[in-house]
Amino acid sequence: MRVLRELEEIIRTRNIQTVFQPIVNTKAATIIGYEALSRGPQGSPLASPEDLFTAAKEHDLLWELESVCRSRAFENAQAHGHRGYLFINVDPQVLKDANFRAGLTSELVGEHQFHPSQIVFEVTEKSSIVDYPAFREALRYYTEQGFKIAIDDVGSGCSGMRTIAEIHPQFIKLDMGLVRDIDKDALKQEIARHLLAMCASVNMRLIAEGVETMSELGALLELGVEYVQGYLLGRPSADLSYTISKAVIECMQLIARERENLSCRPEAISIGCLATPVEAISEFVTAKEALALMSKKNLSGIVVTRDGRPIGLVMKSACQAMTAATYGKAIYADRSVCFLMDRNPLVVGFTSHLGDIVQLALARHEEKIYDYVVVVHEERYFGVVTVKKMLEKMRQDLIGARSLPPNGELRSVGGSE
């Protein structure tokens, strides 16, 4: 009863401390956002977050506590002038709560002058998700408004891959248990490498959590991990006055130079150098209008964007096949192109290596193997690259480097331009 009374008093008085931990882009050595973490009052038996949220679950006050924590996070973030991503921890049980869905977060976003695209709901992989279809539907309610999703603690439990496959998050956070001593553990490095490849192929971003040593950071940078979080970069703090230490920046720059030295290899050319800045369309364009534009511009496909960021890809052949089917024209022609687009195209960063992207492109399902590769620069749509163009570039460079005959094997692999 003492714990219950303490919990009720904390909720009634909103006596929650919010601390923020930075998430760093290692390529630019900049902070892209913060994870908001909640603490109970100092000296209270519920001071630690683990005790606080365990008590809330036991006394069926999880929604009430999380609503206070969320409100305090927005208030404090605004007070410190934060304008980047704000990662908000959400328990799967609360996300499906009718009260949560009633619009509290949307109200907080507007009240504190944020945009939904800045808010990332961080769902812990340690929490059990019993009904995946219902959970997916709950998430769709938020993602359609522009909110983003992150899966926390990936690798800490046995359901991580299924959670990723069911939810299609924008971010996954590598559990600190897989980051600890990764510089000394080849298996952990291989797990991180495979997760990175998966993220690149389905337009997700990997954040390595719990980075505490320069050796761990160095290993992650050599693997190509772009986003990191941990005590080495910054401990949780009530304010946002973080500066990345000179030593950390020098480590980032050193690894970046070493990786750049490898770019002399033909297969390591930046994919952005091959990208064509093809016009994009909004999600409000109809399928009929999209087809007309592709025909007029002689395009094989077109990218669908929202706020300058790619959300889908429509290939002309697939669009024509769908609208040509029985009743297809009547069903799709005047509806949003979103009903026909591929929501998970291959989206890659401007500086990605050509050789890596060719492998990812050719590993796609046979029906999608010649779809455009979508290129982004600083998270915004930049252009597209065809498989044909990538293979021709590799062939030209290999001919120059090894004097291969011009009618080499790669010449036979084609695709629409």
Image (cartoon, helix red, strand yellow):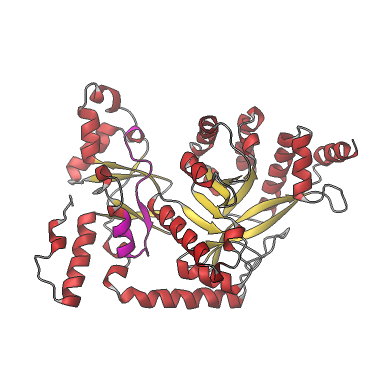
Q: Is residue 269 visible?
A: no
| Residue at position x 61%, y 64% in the image | 180
Q: Nearer the viewer, residue 283 or 417?
A: 417
Residue at image position (20%, 28%) is: 324
What residue range appears in magenta? 339-360
Query: Can see residue 159?
Result: yes
Residue 318: quarter of image:
top left
Q: Residue at x 43, y 53 (%)?
A: 199
Q: Picture coordinates of residue 399 (x, y %)?
A: 16, 72
Please report the residue visible at 69 percent of the width from the left and 51 percent of the height from the top: 37
Q: Is residue 39 left or right of residue 387?
A: right
Q: Is 127 situated above or below 248?
A: above
Q: Is residue 304 left or right of residue 194?
A: left
Horizontal placement of 126 versus 267: left or right? right
Find residue 123 and report its horizontal and vertical position in percent: 59, 44
72 and 217: which one is in front? 217
Is residue 341 within the magenta segment? Answer: yes
Q: Is residue 394 magenta?
A: no
Tell me residue 125's x, y (percent).
59, 46
Residue 215 at what x, y percent from top left? 57, 74
